[in-house]
Image (cartoon, rainbow, N blue to C red):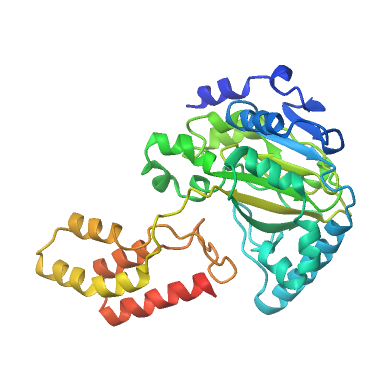
Amino acid sequence: MINSLKDQINRSADPCAMPLATSIEKNVAIYDCANLSNVNEAALKAELAANLLEGPGVFVLKGSFDDTSPVDEATAIFLDIIEQEKTSKGGGEDHFAKAGANDRVWNSLEKLCMASPEIFARYHSNRWIRLASEAWLGPAFQVTAQVNLVRPGGEAQEAHTDYHLGFMTTDQVDSYPAHIHATSAQLTLQGAEAHCDMPIESGTTKLLPFSQNWPGNYGHFRDPDVRALFDEHHVQLPLGKGDLLFFSPGLLHGAGDNRTADIDRMANLLQVSSAFGRSLEAIDRVKMCKTLYPTLLEAKNSSSMTDSEIAAAIASSAEGYPFPTNLDTDPPVGGLAPPSQQALMNQGIAEGWTSKKFETELDGREAKRSS
């Protein structure tokens, strides 16, 4: 398995495939937004999509703001939110990093909008975020965002992949067929907006170009030999305030160590989701779960249905995916994701919870998701 990863990353970016790029540095395509104003937009989108699908899997859009004052104004709001949340609840939990290694603002998108719709409008009117998102996902995409602030001395993240399959345990990843592994990254786009100038020593994102098409990227990024290879071959680039970094969520990556004495490295992390990750109908699954639970519990107790049949009924009724959720009140403590409705329902049946206990647990679960 490790040899196939070596084969993937021992490639070089083809300049002919990225003619609109200003430069290619360490296999990362760099685009100067000031030079793209008169470029054919369809051609640029096609080039960026090809990069993510078949090329290095990562690119930078430099100077995405003509005036970076909206970035500074948003930074001030995010710092206020961090202090408020530390006071009220001790700060946000993190993925892939030691507790307390950095500061998080979950759902920075909504929080910025509620704090100042005027600043939100100036900040999120950035046409380059829209262009990159449409290049990979087409129209009607959905943006979510989380601020990550790493102070001097903050340690690096472990190498990982991202949402969706990157947020699952190895066993969960293995339960999905190979073609889902191949398409998962095509449902989302990972990005980061730099809120300050970031030299490499401040811990800019470590990247492993071309790793997004390695078949083991989701199921094996935790393997010691994979992480050793990542540590040996990753690349990092400096970013300026207002620069945008976009990459495939299947790309092996991780924030670096902040080795500076005076740079609080702040980035607003973007997860942009395809419109197609939606069901056809709106269904009240909480009501369904409460109605169905007594029937399934009786079937379990009377042995009128097998465990496999009960699991199938639960799969057709309860929500099997814990996202979207409110990560402030429903953080991924002890793992990468909170439990789903299905997990709760299966647990209740297995442990013989009464209907009242199940409804209490389910209501508590839903309250965390929507608070």
Q: Is residue 31 left or right of residue 172?
A: right
Q: Quadrant of residue 303?
A: bottom left
Q: Residue furthest bottom?
A: 356
Left or right position of 165 against 92: left
182 on left or right of 203: left
Question: Between residues 259 and 131, which one lies in front from this camera angle?
Answer: 131
Image location (x, y in percent) of residue 265: 80, 53
Number of numbered labels in the structure image: 0
The vertical placement of 170 against 301, above or below, is above
Nearest the viewer among 133 and 366 is: 133
Q: Work out whether 157 lies above or below 358.
A: above
Position of residue 238 measured from the top left corner of the image (x, y, whole percent): 82, 39
Q: Quadrant of the C terminus?
A: bottom right
Camera sees residue 108: yes
Q: Residue at x 49, y 41 (%)?
A: 184
- Vertically, is 76 above or below 44? below
Visible residue check, residue 105: no
| Residue drawn at 76 percent across, 37 percent down | 60
Find residue 334 and report its horizontal and vertical position in percent: 51, 61
Residue drawn where x is 75% and y is 72% of the image: 115
- The image shows residue 178 at horizontal and vertical percentages of 40, 34
Residue 111 vs 168, above or below: the answer is below
> At 51% from the left edge and 50% from the top edge, which residue is drawn?
167
As drawn, is 151 to the left or to the right of 300?
Answer: right
